[in-house]
C-alpha cells in the first residue's frame, strides 16, 4: 500500500515541500503544457502540476468529497477556465504545493479556488481514513 498522504496546509513560498518523486520534481520545476492537468470537481476546473501517478492519487482523494465523479483530464477543458484569477494563476510564483505520498501536486488556481481544492483534498483524506478505520481487519 502506498504511503498515506498528510493533511495539507497551504505552505508559504519558503515552506514548500520538496517531493521525493523525481517526476513530480521535474514537473514542478518546469511546468509546461505536457505536465499540466485539469481537475474537474463539481463546479471547479483547476489546473494542477505533478507526475501522472500523484495527480491521479490527488484526484482519487478529492473524489471522496463529491457525489459526482472527480475527473482528471490532460488537455484544456472545452469551455476553458471560467475564473479570470485561475486563468492567470500559472504566472503567480506563490501557488499551493500539496504533499501527496512521496510526491507533490501544485494547485495553479486563484486563492479562493486553490484554498477550496486544498480543503477538499484534506477532507477527502479524513474521509478515506475514516472508511479505512471502519473496515474489519483480517487476522
Image (cartoon, grey):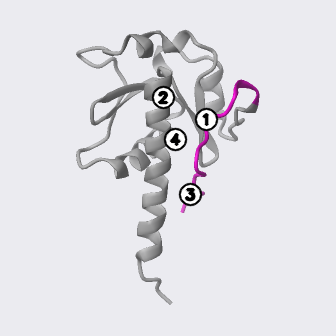
* Residue that appears at 69% across and 29% down: 12
* Residue that appears at 30% across and 15% down: 82
Write down the residue under mark 1: 10
Write down the residue under mark 3: 2
Q: Could you say which is closer to the camera, residue 35 or residue 83?
A: 83
Q: Could you say which is closer to the camera, residue 108 or residue 20?
A: 108
Q: Earlier in the sequence, mark 2 or mark 1?
A: 1
How packed is label 3: few (under 14 Cα within 10 Å), some, or many (20 or more)?
Answer: few
Give the quadrant of residue 50.
top right
Q: Earlier in the sequence, mark 1 or mark 3?
A: 3
Cα separation between marks 4 and 1: 17 Å
Which residues lie in the magenta part? Answer: 1-14
Q: For this view, does 54 lie left or right of residue 77?
A: right
- Marker disc for residue 54: 4
Q: Earlier in the sequence, mark 4 or mark 2?
A: 4
Image coordinates for residue 112, horizontal then vertical, percent: 45, 26
How packed is label 2: few (under 14 Cα within 10 Å), some, or many (20 or more)?
Answer: many
Write down the residue under mark 2: 114
Q: Nearer the viewer, mark 2 or mark 3?
A: 2
Q: Earlier in the sequence, mark 2 or mark 3?
A: 3
Cα separation between marks 2 and 1: 9 Å
Judging from the image, what secondary structure is the residue with disc 1 in? Answer: loop
Amino acid at each position: 500500500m502506498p504511503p498515506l498522504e498528510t493533511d495539507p496546509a497551504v505552505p508559504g513560498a519558503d515552506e514548500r515541500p520538496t517531493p521525493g518523486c523525481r517526476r513530480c520534481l521535474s514537473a514542478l520545476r518546469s511546468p509546461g503544457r505536457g505536465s499540466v492537468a485539469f481537475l474537474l470537481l463539481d463546479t471547479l476546473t483547476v489546473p494542477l502540476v505533478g507526475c501522472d501517478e500523484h495527480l491521479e492519487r490527488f484526484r482519487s482523494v478529492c473524489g471522496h468529497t463529491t457525489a459526482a465523479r472527480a475527473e482528471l483530464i490532460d488537455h484544456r477543458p472545452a469551455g476553458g477556465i471560467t475564473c479570470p484569477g485561475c486563468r492567470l494563476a500559472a504566472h503567480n510564483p506563490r501557488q499551493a504545493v500539496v504533499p501527496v505520498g512521496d510526491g507533490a501536486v501544485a494547485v495553479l488556481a486563484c486563492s479562493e479556488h486553490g484554498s477550496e481544492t486544498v480543503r477538499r483534498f484534506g477532507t477527502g483524506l479524513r474521509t478515506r481514513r475514516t472508511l479505512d478505520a471502519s473496515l474489519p481487519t483480517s487476522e
